[in-house]
């Protein structure tokens, strides 16, 4: 049995599901690409643009975002218009779908030999609690799902009520927590502020893991990223009884030295080594532009993480369909399943199944072989 710890299913990106308005949803997508890894192109001329076109350049917060009619285009593009000029960036592979039915995700899983998948929420797709609740109800034993709330307001009664509803009524079994969500109040607060204790108390009571999406929230981005990782470590030491998953692997682009070698800073090791912390192995999607299948550089990283953290702290995720930037769905699995030959059969069993089965309460998960 193989479990994909990070997959997606979502309704039309143009439906703005779960958001109060289209604008609110598109702001959350816009902030995600204010400092993009991909080049911004002036559509009419093909010129690569270096000046800021999405924000006033002063911060990454909501109040700095410009009104540029930010929108999802076709074929994996994000598009916007400023001063009468159209811009775009190729955020995803051109195969990126405008909606992804759970039936298609399931067909891909069956094709690659994957038995179950954890479906992640994320602001760019919408606020999908009800949608994912319906998917896991329709496909019992195949999917688990994550809750999403507005992180910047998670001390508020309505957000805590939504968390409780999504877990107790919709049967979602983990919390997706994107620290970028604090942009709604211009990063006035951080997730470890004591004002949010009331929310974390409820997460602990519900006994669900937190799936962290850690990104830099300021400049210099490399330094800010490491600071956020260290903050997560302090948080995890304080909330010892809440299991956490560090999703999306590590941000390779921000950790590379000039020779292209990934250097894991001490703060990151310290956070990842905490007993309640786990690491999602998800590398091609983050670095596919530089690395080719079967990603020997990623295998070396996995070897290093395995040596220091052990297989029971690691879990494989595809992040399909974003992963198509770099690999087909079977390839996003096979660089670990087939090519990490240094892992024993029981280590692979942990990474490809056991760790996720323990953390994410899949329906019937007690039958999963670990
Ligand atoms: Zn994802």
Image (cartoon, grey):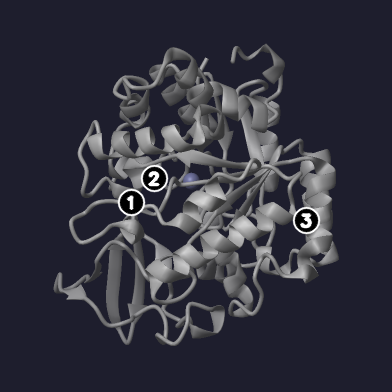
- What is the crowding at mark 3: few (fewer than 14 residues within 10 Å), some, or many (at least 20)? many
- In terms of depth relative to the viewer, which is nearer, 226 or 96? 226
Q: Is residue 131 depicted above or below 337 in this figure?
A: below
Residue that label 1 marks: 92
Q: Is residue 113 depicted above or below 152 in this figure?
A: above
Looking at the image, is mark 3 or mark 2 earlier in the sequence? 3
The residue drawn where x is 22% and y is 76% is 49
Query: Image quarter for residue 332?
Result: top left
Beta carbon of the mark 3 residue lies under 8 A of ligand 1: no
Residue that label 2 marks: 322
Looking at the image, is mark 2 or mark 1 earlier in the sequence? 1
Looking at the image, is mark 3 or mark 1 earlier in the sequence? 1
Beta carbon of the mark 1 residue lies under 8 A of ligand 1: no
Where residue 238 appears, x then y in whole percent? 73, 56
Mark nearer the viewer, 3 or 1: 3
Where residue 364 appears, x then y in whole percent? 71, 17
- Check if mark 2's residue and mark 1's residue have beta carbons within 8 Å: yes
Quadrant housing the C terminus: top right
Q: Judging from the image, what secondary structure is the residue with disc 1 in?
A: loop
Where residue 167 appears, x then y in whole percent? 78, 41
- In terms of depth relative to the viewer, which is nearer, 216 or 131? 216
Where residue 255 appears, x then y in whole percent? 34, 58
The residue drawn where x is 84% and y is 61% is 198
CA separation in Å, label 3 and label 1 = 33 Å
Residue that label 3 marks: 200
Beta carbon of the mark 2 residue lies under 8 A of ligand 1: yes
The residue drawn where x is 74% and y is 63% is 154
Q: Judging from the image, what secondary structure is the residue with disc 3 in?
A: helix
- In terms of depth relative to the viewer, which is nearer, 264 or 160? 264
- What is the crowding at mark 1: few (fewer than 14 residues within 10 Å), some, or many (at least 20)? many
């Amino acid at each position: 049995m193989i479990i994909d710890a990070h997959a997606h299913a979502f309704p039309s990106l143009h439906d703005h599901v779960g958001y109060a308005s289209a604008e609110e949803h598109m702001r959350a997508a816009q902030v995600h690409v204010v400092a993009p890894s991909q080049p911004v192109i002036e559509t009419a001329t093909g010129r690569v643009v270096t000046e800021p076109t999405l924000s006033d350049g002063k911060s990454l917060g909501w109040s700095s975002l410009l009104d540029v009619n930010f929108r999802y285009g076709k074929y994996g593009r994000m598009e916007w218009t400023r001063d009468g000029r159209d811009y775009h960036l190729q955020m995803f592979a051109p195969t990126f779908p405008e909606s992804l039915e759970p039936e298609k995700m399931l067909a891909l899983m069956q094709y690659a030999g994957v038995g179950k998948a954890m479906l992640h929420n994320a602001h760019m797709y919408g606020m999908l609690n009800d949608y994912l609740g319906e998917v896991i109800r329709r496909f019992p034993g195949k999917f688990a799902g994550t809750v999403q709330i507005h992180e910047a307001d998670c001390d508020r009664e309505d957000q805590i009520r939504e968390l409780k509803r999504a877990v107790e009524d919709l049967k979602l079994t983990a919390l997706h927590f994107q620290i970028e969500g604090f942009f709604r109040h211009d990063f006035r607060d951080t997730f470890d502020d004591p004002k949010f204790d009331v929310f974390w108390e409820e997460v602990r009571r519900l006994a669900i893991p937190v799936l962290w999406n850690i990104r830099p929230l300021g400049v210099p981005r490399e330094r800010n990223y490491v600071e956020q990782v260290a903050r997560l470590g302090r948080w995890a030491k304080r909330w010892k009884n809440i299991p956490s998953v560090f999703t999306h692997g590590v941000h390779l682009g921000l950790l590379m030295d000039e020779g292209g070698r990934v250097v894991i800073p001490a703060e990151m090791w310290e956070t990842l080594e905490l007993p309640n912390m786990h690491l999602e192995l998800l590398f091609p999607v983050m670095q596919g532009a530089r690395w080719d299948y079967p990603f020997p550089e990623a295998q070396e990283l996995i070897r290093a993480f395995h040596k220091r953290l052990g297989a029971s702290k690691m879990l494989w995720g595809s992040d399909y369909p974003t992963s198509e930037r770099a690999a087909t769905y079977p390839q996003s699995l096979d660089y670990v399943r087939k090519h990490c030959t240094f892992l024993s059969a029981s280590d692979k069993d942990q990474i490809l199944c056991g760790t996720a089965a323990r953390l994410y309460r899949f329906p019937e998960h007690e039958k999963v072989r670990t």
